[in-house]
Image (spheres, grey):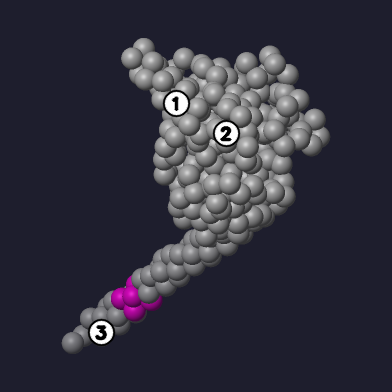
Amino acid sequence: MGKKSAERNARLDTLRREQRRQERRRSLLIYGTGGLVAVALLAGIIVYALVDNRAKDESRSVGHVTTASAAATATGCTGVVNDASRGSTHVATNQTVNYEVAPPSSGNHDSSPLPDAYRFYERIPNLRIERAVHNLEHGFVIGWYDPKLPDDQVTALRTAADAAGNRFIAVPWERGEFADNKHFVLTAWDRTQRCATVSESAIKDFVKTYANPSLAGAAWASPTAPESGASGGPLDLSPTVAGTAQADDAQADNTQADNTQAGTAPTAGSSTGTATSAPAGTATTP
């Protein structure tokens, strides 16, 4: 091999080594940068998960307040408060539960919920609140109205109840008046929002958010309806309106038969059909 050929081959070898070195360097830069990006993405995912979990833990904790919707704010409603769980034991049909908070959003209750055939209940003497609390456990929303709610607001509530869907029931509270001049209160299981006036939009927002919650929420610090999605109770209201059973039952049977023939819901407050008044009877037990 001549001298020139040897020098050329040496230069080629040098060029090849330099090329291979540069290729290795580029590979290291590519893979190194990709690795850093992957690490950064993973770190971001971990941080996001931690922040998200913390936010969820806070939103599920007792005492947390969720900001009121625009419609609720406009009608003097507070934010929605996560309440402490106050029991879920069934009590006897003649046993009165002294609820710590008026109105209750959870607590011990009657084994039979109120019928869900009715959206609005009149101010019935001795209406059994303990049955309504069972509706909350089933994932219903209760719109409670106290004796101080003005008549025009009661009329508005009756109209709103008909439009709120089949998981909403309006129930009168006859054990005093609510605090802070908020005479209309929305509750779901362990969720409470107090309002100055009745708003159909606010009711719909609350129902959309809190009716029939996921059963996974039953394990939260402030639980949501452990029997979510279950139905209301039977149309028999004898445990609800205490009184002379035979006379009241006969009146209820006759009225139900008349309403069935007329194509309207049976009486017991106001129904999903024609609004009617419930038979009160003569109260003898709580």
Q: Quadrant of the N terminus?
A: bottom left
Query: Which stretch is magenta?
Result: 16-22
Label 2 neighbourhood size at 10 Å, few (<14), some (14-19), many (20+)?
many
**Residue 216 placement (x, y as % from top left):** 47, 55
Secondary structure of residue under mark 1: helix
**Residue 109 placement (x, y as % from top left):** 57, 49
Label 1 neighbourhood size at 10 Å, few (<14), some (14-19), many (20+)?
few
Distance of label 3 from label 2 (alpha carbons): 119 Å
Q: How many marks?
A: 3
Q: Quadrant of the C terminus?
A: top right
Label 3 neighbourhood size at 10 Å, few (<14), some (14-19), many (20+)?
few
Q: Of all residues shown, which one is farthest toward the top?
A: 262
Callout 3, which amino acid? Ala
Mark 3 highlights which residue? 6
- The answer to whether the residues at label 2 and label 1 have Cβ atoms under 8 Å apart is no
Distance of label 2 from label 1 (alpha carbons): 12 Å
Mark 1 highlights which residue? 250
**Which tag, 3 or 2, sits closer to the chain's start?**
3
Q: Nearer the viewer, mark 3 or mark 2?
A: 2
Q: Residue at x 39, y 17 (%)?
A: 259
> Position of 210 compared to 80: left or right?
left
**Residue 279 placement (x, y as % from top left):** 54, 24
Callout 1, which amino acid? Ala
Mark 2 highlights which residue? 243
Callout 2, which amino acid? Gly
> Position of 11 compared to 281: left or right?
left
